[in-house]
Image (cartoon, helix red, strand yellow):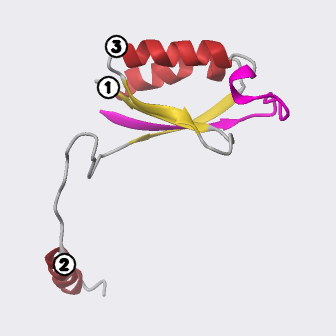
Protein backbone atom coordinates (compact mmCIF):
# COMPACT_ATOMS: atom_id res chain seq x y z
CA UNK A 1 0.00 0.00 0.00
CA UNK A 2 1.28 3.43 -0.92
CA UNK A 3 0.97 6.48 1.30
CA UNK A 4 1.85 10.13 0.87
CA UNK A 5 3.08 11.78 4.05
CA UNK A 6 3.05 15.58 4.20
CA UNK A 7 5.12 17.09 7.00
CA UNK A 8 4.41 20.59 8.33
CA UNK A 9 6.61 22.45 10.82
CA UNK A 10 5.13 23.21 14.25
CA UNK A 11 5.98 26.07 16.59
CA UNK A 12 9.06 24.04 17.64
CA UNK A 13 10.57 24.79 14.21
CA UNK A 14 13.40 27.35 14.43
CA UNK A 15 12.77 29.91 11.66
CA UNK A 16 16.34 31.15 11.25
CA UNK A 17 18.01 27.73 11.36
CA UNK A 18 18.93 25.73 8.24
CA UNK A 19 16.67 22.75 7.50
CA UNK A 20 19.19 20.00 8.33
CA UNK A 21 20.26 21.80 11.52
CA UNK A 22 16.74 21.79 12.99
CA UNK A 23 16.14 19.87 16.24
CA UNK A 24 15.83 16.11 15.59
CA UNK A 25 16.37 16.54 11.84
CA UNK A 26 19.58 14.42 11.77
CA UNK A 27 17.71 11.61 13.56
CA UNK A 28 14.82 11.98 11.10
CA UNK A 29 17.16 11.76 8.10
CA UNK A 30 18.82 8.58 9.42
CA UNK A 31 15.40 7.08 10.28
CA UNK A 32 14.14 7.72 6.75
CA UNK A 33 17.39 6.39 5.25
CA UNK A 34 16.97 3.13 7.18
CA UNK A 35 13.40 2.75 5.88
CA UNK A 36 14.65 3.55 2.37
CA UNK A 37 17.28 0.81 2.69
CA UNK A 38 14.50 -1.62 3.70
CA UNK A 39 12.47 -0.69 0.60
CA UNK A 40 9.72 1.27 2.36
CA UNK A 41 10.60 4.81 1.24
CA UNK A 42 10.10 5.50 -2.46
CA UNK A 43 10.55 9.29 -2.52
CA UNK A 44 11.49 11.73 0.22
CA UNK A 45 12.69 15.26 0.65
CA UNK A 46 12.02 18.82 1.78
CA UNK A 47 10.05 21.39 -0.16
CA UNK A 48 12.29 23.90 -1.91
CA UNK A 49 11.00 26.74 0.30
CA UNK A 50 11.74 24.59 3.39
CA UNK A 51 8.12 24.86 4.54
CA UNK A 52 8.01 21.13 5.26
CA UNK A 53 8.48 18.00 3.24
CA UNK A 54 6.93 14.87 1.82
CA UNK A 55 7.61 11.15 1.75
CA UNK A 56 6.00 8.44 -0.37
CA UNK A 57 6.11 5.15 1.51
CA UNK A 58 5.14 1.56 0.78
CA UNK A 59 3.97 -0.76 3.57
CA UNK A 60 1.81 -3.89 3.66
CA UNK A 61 -0.78 -2.32 5.96
CA UNK A 62 -2.03 1.10 6.98
CA UNK A 63 -1.16 0.24 10.58
CA UNK A 64 2.48 -0.38 9.63
CA UNK A 65 2.59 2.91 7.73
CA UNK A 66 1.12 4.81 10.69
CA UNK A 67 3.59 3.15 13.05
CA UNK A 68 6.46 4.23 10.79
CA UNK A 69 5.34 7.87 10.82
CA UNK A 70 4.59 7.94 14.55
CA UNK A 71 8.07 6.54 15.35
CA UNK A 72 9.79 9.23 13.27
CA UNK A 73 11.90 11.31 15.72
CA UNK A 74 10.78 14.57 14.12
CA UNK A 75 7.12 13.63 14.75
CA UNK A 76 7.72 12.11 18.20
CA UNK A 77 9.41 15.31 19.34
CA UNK A 78 6.74 17.58 17.90
CA UNK A 79 8.90 19.45 15.38
CA UNK A 80 6.63 18.36 12.51
CA UNK A 81 2.97 17.49 12.37
CA UNK A 82 1.92 15.22 9.53
CA UNK A 83 -0.93 14.26 7.28
CA UNK A 84 -1.03 10.75 5.81
CA UNK A 85 -3.10 9.76 2.79
CA UNK A 86 -3.31 6.39 1.07
CA UNK A 87 -2.26 6.97 -2.50
CA UNK A 88 -3.23 5.20 -5.70
CA UNK A 89 -0.42 5.79 -8.18
CA UNK A 90 -2.21 6.40 -11.47
CA UNK A 91 0.89 7.10 -13.52
CA UNK A 92 4.59 7.09 -12.79
CA UNK A 93 7.70 7.58 -14.90
CA UNK A 94 9.70 6.03 -12.06
CA UNK A 95 7.76 2.77 -12.31
CA UNK A 96 7.01 2.96 -16.03
CA UNK A 97 3.29 3.01 -15.25
CA UNK A 98 1.40 4.69 -18.06
CA UNK A 99 -2.39 4.32 -18.35
CA UNK A 100 -2.22 5.94 -21.82
CA UNK A 101 -5.46 7.87 -21.54
CA UNK A 102 -6.42 9.92 -24.57
CA UNK A 103 -9.26 12.08 -25.80
CA UNK A 104 -11.48 8.99 -26.11
CA UNK A 105 -11.40 8.80 -22.30
CA UNK A 106 -13.14 12.18 -22.11
CA UNK A 107 -15.81 11.07 -24.58
CA UNK A 108 -16.50 7.81 -22.70
CA UNK A 109 -16.74 9.59 -19.36
CA UNK A 110 -18.98 12.34 -20.74
CA UNK A 111 -21.41 9.70 -22.01
CA UNK A 112 -21.45 8.04 -18.61
CA UNK A 113 -21.87 11.39 -16.82
CA UNK A 114 -24.85 12.23 -19.06
CA UNK A 115 -26.35 8.82 -18.36
CA UNK A 116 -25.91 9.46 -14.63
CA UNK A 117 -27.53 12.87 -15.02
CA UNK A 118 -24.62 14.78 -13.56
CA UNK A 119 -23.88 16.91 -16.63
Instruction: Identify the residue at horizontal 34%, vertical 13% (top origin).
Output: 38
Residue at 68% x, 45% y: name it: 49
Which mark's residue is nearer the viewer, 1 or 2? 2
Q: Tell me where residue 17 appears, x and y as whole percent.
A: 81, 28
Q: Identify residue for label 2.
A: 103
Q: Tell me which corner region of the image, top left, top right, bottom left or bottom right, holds residue 51.
A: top right
- Asked whether the viewer can see residue 114, the reply is yes
Disc 1 to disc 2: CB gap under 8 Å: no
Q: Looking at the rendered structure, which numbered label has been put on residue 61?
A: 1
Question: What's the magenta region?
Answer: 1-21
63 up-or-down from 109: above or below? above
Q: Name the residue under label 3.
A: 38
**1 or 3: mark nearer the eye:** 3
1 or 2: tag closer to the N-terminus: 1
Cβ atoms at labels 1 and 3 below 8 Å apart: no
Q: 61 or 41: which is nearer to us?
A: 41
Element class at badge 1: loop
Query: Per the image, is 20 magenta?
Result: yes
Tell me where residue 4 sits by quadrant. Answer: top left
- Residue at image x 36%, y 43%? 87
Amino acid sequence: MRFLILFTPTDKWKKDIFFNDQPFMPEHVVYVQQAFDQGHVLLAGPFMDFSGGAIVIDFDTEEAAKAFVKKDPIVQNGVFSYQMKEWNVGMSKLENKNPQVGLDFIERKRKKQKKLGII
